[in-house]
Image: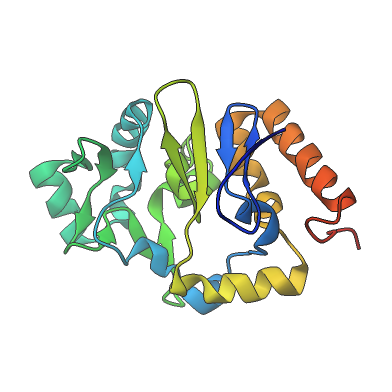
Amino acid sequence: MTMVTQKKKLPILQVGNVLVDPAIFTVQFCCDLSVCKGRCCVEGEAGAPIIPDEVRNIESSLAIVSDDLSASAKDVIRRQGAWYIDKDRSLDVSIVGCKDCVFTCYDRNGICLCALEKAYRAGKTEWMKPISCALYPLREKDFHNGTFGLAYRWWNVCKGALEKGRELNLPLYQFLKDPLIRRFGQDWYDLLCATAKQLEIQKIIPSTAP
């Protein structure tokens, strides 16, 4: 674990080849769809970032999830595709009306769901959804030198998730265990957990032990 000095209460931590926002250890978080209704998929000015390898997965899933998509989403996909290149030359999932992800769908309670994830959980596909979506509220940055960064993004729509996380005493890195392993591997996640344990022993962060 290498400390990288920064003017914050806690420094940025380097875990392996990833610069980690200390909020990953200190913020308690657990999505509560009953409160937020999945608004992170329908609010914002740009689509979810994707990597080139995910384009093929998205394209191969289109026919499978088509019935769950709105007519407006299908129209956007027909006109410009399921993804686009933004002003920063990055790849993003297409959106409807400058906000809704084209893959949004709703359950009977009006909760917004991801059609891609819904198909995956139903066993119809082998790919869940873009890793940027799975890692939210963390955002990843590629420094293009073999090093990556993970930053916590606070958003008011996630107030319910913060409250539920505090109730469960669930830090962000534990809530995001599966997507972090999916992105960086089990060995890296084990190193992240070891870093958290060191910080607990040093009483830099509170213990999560029951």
User: Which residue is located at x 20 percent, y 35 percent?
Assistant: 89
Q: Quadrant of residue 40?
A: bottom left
The image shows residue 129, relative to residue 60, as above or below, that is below
> How many callouts does the rendering have?
0
Depth check, front residue: 138 or 2: 2
In the image, taking residue 29 as reference, residue 106 lies left or right, namely left
Which residue is at 47% across, 35% downward?
127
Locate residue 41 relative to residue 194 in the image: left or right.
left
The x, y position of residue 46, in whole percent, is: 25, 54
As drawn, which residue projects farthest toward the left?
79
Q: Quadrant of the N terminus?
A: top right
Q: Toward the viewer: 169 or 59?
A: 169
Can residue 112 be seen in this snapshot? Answer: yes
Q: Position of residue 78 (x, y in %)?
A: 12, 45
Q: Does residue 122 show up?
A: no
Q: From the image, which quarter does the C terminus lie in?
A: bottom right
Q: Nearer the viewer, residue 86 or 68?
A: 86
| Residue 113 image position (x, y, % from top left) | 43, 61
In the image, is 62 to the left or to the right of 136? left
Q: Residue at x 37, y 31 (%)?
A: 54
Render colour scheme: rainbow
Spot occupied by residue 90 in the image (x, y as percentages of width and height): 25, 37
